[in-house]
Image (spheres, rainbow, N blue to C red):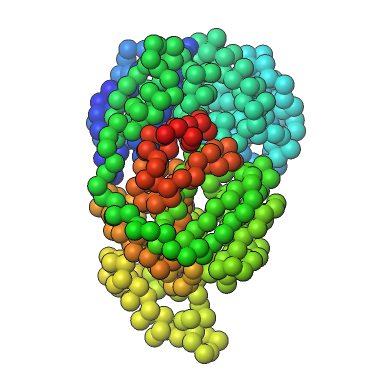
Amino acid sequence: MTGIVKEFPGVRALDGADLQLARGEVHALLGINGAGKSTLIKVLSGVYRADAGRISLNGKAVEINSPQSAIDHGIATVYQDPQMIESFTGYENIHLGSESESSGLFPRIRRRKLLARARGLLEKFPVDIDLERPVGQLSAVEKESIAILRALSRENMSVLVLDEPTSILTRREIDVLFEQIRMLTDSGISIIYITHRLDEVFQIADRFTVFRDGRQVATCGTSDEGVDHARIAELMLGRELSHMYPPKGDRPGDAVLNVRDLSLEGKFSETSFTARRGWILGVFGLVGSGIDSLCKTLFGVQRRTSGVVEINGRPAALKSPADAIADGLFLVPGDRRAEGQISDESVSFNVILSNMARAAGLGFLINRRTERSDAEAMAAELAVKTPNVDEEVSLLSGGNQQKVVIGKGLYADGEVYIFQEPTVGVDVGAKAGIYEMIRKLSRDKAVIVVGSDCEEVYGLCDQAMVLHQGRVVLDRPAGEVRLDQMLLCGLTGEGGDDG
């Protein structure tokens, strides 16, 4: 891939990006969130069409303008947490979309033939798996194997993209997956391996490429002299912290949220921290670190295994989001479209959704005049750009949609606000305004910023905390932590005790 350019409104996601992949190698693709890795892979997989640049296979230029054309060229992608039909068997999932060799309105499906073809794949890729069991009964690594077999079912497949393949696997399952990857490369298949886990890069990859700001900044062999975890972290950052972040807090205020030994089995354990007024707590973690489950546990979406949570000195039940909101805790989720908004409803409806009793006044029905005036006041406070508050939320820009979700949280009038990935999908122009709003809110409320963008968490926080594989590996005032040290802790789980 040479000189690949991809632009979205307000964002140049790829700016002349390059990637070279050799036959039979595992090539790791690295970079912080927003570096351009995922966009590059979506261009290669035909999900996006490049605005400029060239893709060549075996020295010949190819045109990839759809997922099907990528498959036709022998490029297959296994995305993180591969989606399957749980009630279907392994062999049925392998052949989804190619069940029948005949055409017509009612094509015939020959299940015995499908099973035989799937078993034929096991001769090339000998993994221990029962293809006749429903996928819902398989382990995570077995599901990953089914997804790989589905890719291998394409006769000309020569390039396999694995996107965070170990994020939901145990250590033993990771070892099994690595054995499978070596089988594939021994047969001449080339693998692009996307990961945030640097230890895996040195275990399985032959080379790695680091992306930053939509460009390739380095390609190295994992055995090259001077290449280690710290060098990769340095390449991933490569620049001074942006000046778009507002000034830090002056001093920590009263403790509002106290969390002691909070655990959710299989996700995170014995996590303790305090959130204070006037002092933003930043929690950084990568895929699989436990940050998503931590947010959902605090908001009552997932039930904690153990631990104590107190808000203003009183125990908080947190058995449901309704409990959390009643106790004064509100989560602004990372996936606003799936978890934060009702896209086909109006701005005003979304804003009052967190506190309908406030919009109803003393009655049992929503007071439309109150709804409208409150929504207009909130839109003005957050500078939401919309023709009016009756506008459907899905018609707004990403940044304005995010402001509406934040406005919904403010309307709840809570004591503790958790912002998970606060600017994901937001253009650069809107980020500074959201950062300023978060800092302003922190003067009177306890604010926690949680995310996988190390620079963003570091830039906003006064207290820096890092989760790695479900445990806290760093918890220190931001002024005592370097950005590269914070990133290294998240990548490796080590380095938190360095000066």
Relative to 399, say whether 154 is above or below: above
Q: Is residue 311 left or right of residue 158?
A: right
Quarter in which the C terminus is drawn: top left
Residue at the image point whose x is 48% and y is 36% from the top: 496
Q: How many tags in the picture? A: 0
Q: Is the residue 137 above or below the residue 62 in the image?
A: below
- Can you say whether 16 is above or below 367 in the image? above
- Left or right of 460, for residue 447: right
What's the residue at 29%, 41% (across, down)?
A: 241
Q: Is residue 352 visible?
A: yes
Indicate the position of residue 149 as horizontal and vertical percent values: 60, 24
Residue closer to the observer: 106 or 429: 429
Residue 94 in view of the camera: no
- The picture quadrant where one finds residue 95 is top right
Q: Is residue 72 placed above or below 373 in the rendered structure?
A: above
Q: In the figure, residue 394 lies in which quadrant?
A: bottom left
Q: How far across and down, in percent of the image, does residue 409 sit? A: 45, 67
Seen at 49% across and 19% down, the residue is 202
Q: Nearer the viewer, residue 76 or 201?
A: 201
Q: Nearer the viewer, residue 489 or 452?
A: 489
> What residue appears at the point 62 percent right and 54 percent down from the top-left corner?
260
Please state which of residues 475 and 217 is positioned toward the viewer in this rendering. Answer: 475
Instruction: Give the quadrant of the N terminus.
Output: top left
Q: Residue 283: where, in percent of width, then height?
A: 47, 48
Residue 377 x/y as whole percent: 33, 76
